[in-house]
Image (tube, rainbow, N blue to C red):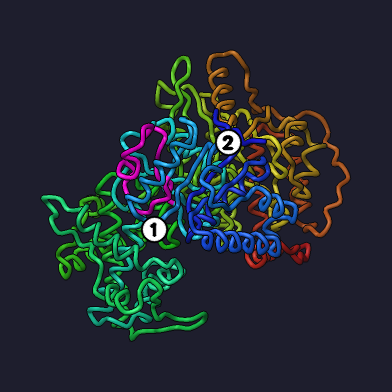
Amino acid sequence: MAYEFAGKRLEKVAVVGSGQIGPDIALHFAKALSGFGVQVVVVDVSEAALQAGFARTCKKIDKGTETAAWKPAQAEAMKAVLTFTSDYAQIAGAGLVVEAATEDEGLKGRIFGQVEALVASDAILLSNSSHLEPERIFAALQHQQRTAVAHYFFPAERNPVVEIVSSPATDPALTAWLLRFYEALGKVPIPVQSRYGYAADPIFEGIFQAACLCVQEGLGTVKEVDFAAREALGMTVGPFTAMNLTGGNPITEHGLDLMQQRFATPQWPTPWYQAPRLLKELLAKHGAAGKWEVCGRGETAELPEAQKVKVIDALRGAYLGLCFGILDTGILTLGDYELCLEMALDLTGPCKLANRLGLSQALALVERYAAGHPTLQVPHTLRALAAAGESVQVPLLTQHDVAVAGGAVRVVAIRRPKVLNALDHGTYQQLEAALAAALADPQVVGLVLTGAGNKAFVSGADIKALGRVKSPAEGYALSRLGQDTCRSFEQAGKPVVAALNGLAFGGGFELALACHARVAVAGVRTLVGLPEVNLGIIPGAGGTQRLPRLIGVDKALPLLRTGAPLASEQALALGIVRSLHPADQLLDAAVELVAQAAAGQVQLPHLGQQAQAGDVSLPQTDIGHRSRAVDAILCEVVTQGLGLPLDAALEAECRAFERICALQDMQIGVQNFAATGGKLPAPFVHA
């Protein structure tokens, strides 16, 4: 058995190193690829490390079974594909090898010298380095075009981010393949140009250095500064706690000192980065096993308010200065960086923090910190943004063009992985802007709309926005927001195809229904659905009108009244999607369909404005626990809308949504979802 993806076939994956992170990388591969029978081999020269790594991996697999993260059969399959061995010869036949050894340039080079002799010339060789440039790691290899860094974050099997760092010798096609491959495996890959430390570790280690300096300068104890950092930067755990969890003291000392050397330029001869005295003293006294004294579970360490403000200002000034300084280098995009730091390090992104503070205040914090720490540069990117006086717009979409006969198809992907690509006000705005830009570009013949990742096209609309609705008028405005964006796509003068790469629920399904056609991934158990009635509301972005027009009221109304989801094959049978495809072929199929429609080779039917003639009979449907008051309004707007032109029908839906927002059941449903995540049925009162 094998995993085939975008032209490459993997029968075996190898991980070199059974220390801190190697077994976790292997666990991620086993979880993602065991269903395809792909063998995952972990190699190490230390039998003790192999035994410890295997035991820890099995314990995590068993824990996943206990918490229902996976079924017992999957757990057994994961264990079955794993091999921990000291026999390097077992790497032979691996199509992908990830080295996860100690952060030592010479050692990594020697490992890859062995590996290159064991695998085929087209095998992909990756280093899980956290700092070293790929051109240094792979300098002695014959086939450097098939090499790159894949930097995982702790814990590797669960942390979604992987930095993909290419060297000048890396084949661009390999970089593109790695980005798609890791996304297909459920990761959030971040492309970064080669530079020592890449994009995230200078921030992880830089925040730690700033926290140490706060302690050294008498602003608080380790425990107090660690606790204050959580408020300063939105961290789940403070920087000293994070260092304890990752065992990162030795590598951080080495990394910070090397950053000072390798970041030096004629304009910045002595960069701010430097291993702090506090860290060196801990390592000298306790070695690599040294731990910082931090708060235990549930413990607090509050500072006096004036002192806390000084710590928070210092940490924010350093953090914003370092982050925007990385953006100055151009090694990655603003949108990628914001996503990387929020998801990999679990803290507030620099743009979000700068917007919240106000750009002028953010710049002032950096300037004040730099005045006390003159080796910190004030980044020109932040100066320019503050001078412009507007908030920073963080991209929530990715876009690229695919060349086709007669021009190009623009692929627009919604990328909000933390909320499974859910739609909010900013996403609607950026979708409108992306559509307008594509329509204005004479080279673009049409669009493909999809979602980033392998789980969701769009999981729905913003539930938080719904919770903020305080009046029927606000409900109408919220419905109109989604309506207008969907109508813009529906009325686009160029073909628009939705490529459903995963779940399309609620507002996501409504957005897909507004596109001219839909294609989807095969074999998805829960692909589309309009579950709004479970929340005590109705679809508000066109779902009550477009779904009945598309598949008929007799099939649509039971789905609308019960919120029942449909699998890929069911959506195909009902005519909701046009075709099903393997995940790695979905975008290609969508692009081809757009190109054919643009060339007049196929017709993509529009719903049109016309009313539906004749009487509408409502099929018998058991709505279970759901609100009868909501159901009555839903049935009314469906039957009323079918007798109206589409624009009038959509307005009727907005007005119906307005009425829904006056019901008690709407408040009950939304509050129940906020409290239980929809796991428990809402106690509707039918009023």
Q: Residue at x 58, y 36 (%)?
A: 10
Checking the image for residue 349, the label placed there is: 1
User: Would residue 350 be seen by someone viewing this image from the given angle?
Assistant: yes
Most foreground residue, 452 or 423:
452
Most foreground residue, 390 or 107:
107
Dot 2: element = strand
Q: Residue at x 33, y 59 (%)?
A: 203
Q: Is residue 442 above or below residue 398?
A: above
For the C terminus, give its image quadrant.
bottom right
Magenta stretch: give its range: 127-151
Identify residue type, mark 2.
Answer: Leu
Checking the image for residue 10, the label placed there is: 2
In reply to whether residue 141 is colored magenta, the answer given is yes
In reply to whether residue 196 is colored magenta, the answer given is no
Q: Is residue 589 left or right of residue 356?
A: right
Q: Residue 626, percent across and down?
A: 78, 57
The residue carrying pointer 1 sits among few (fewer than 14), some (14 to 19) or many (20 or more) residues within 10 Å by Cα, namely many
Identify residue type, mark 1.
Answer: Gly
Q: Residue 413, percent across and down?
A: 50, 39
The residue carrying pointer 2 sits among few (fewer than 14), some (14 to 19) or many (20 or more) residues within 10 Å by Cα, namely many
User: Would residue 452 be seen by someone viewing this image from the given angle?
Assistant: no
Furthest residue to the bottom?
A: 304
Q: Is residue 528 left or right of residue 599?
A: right
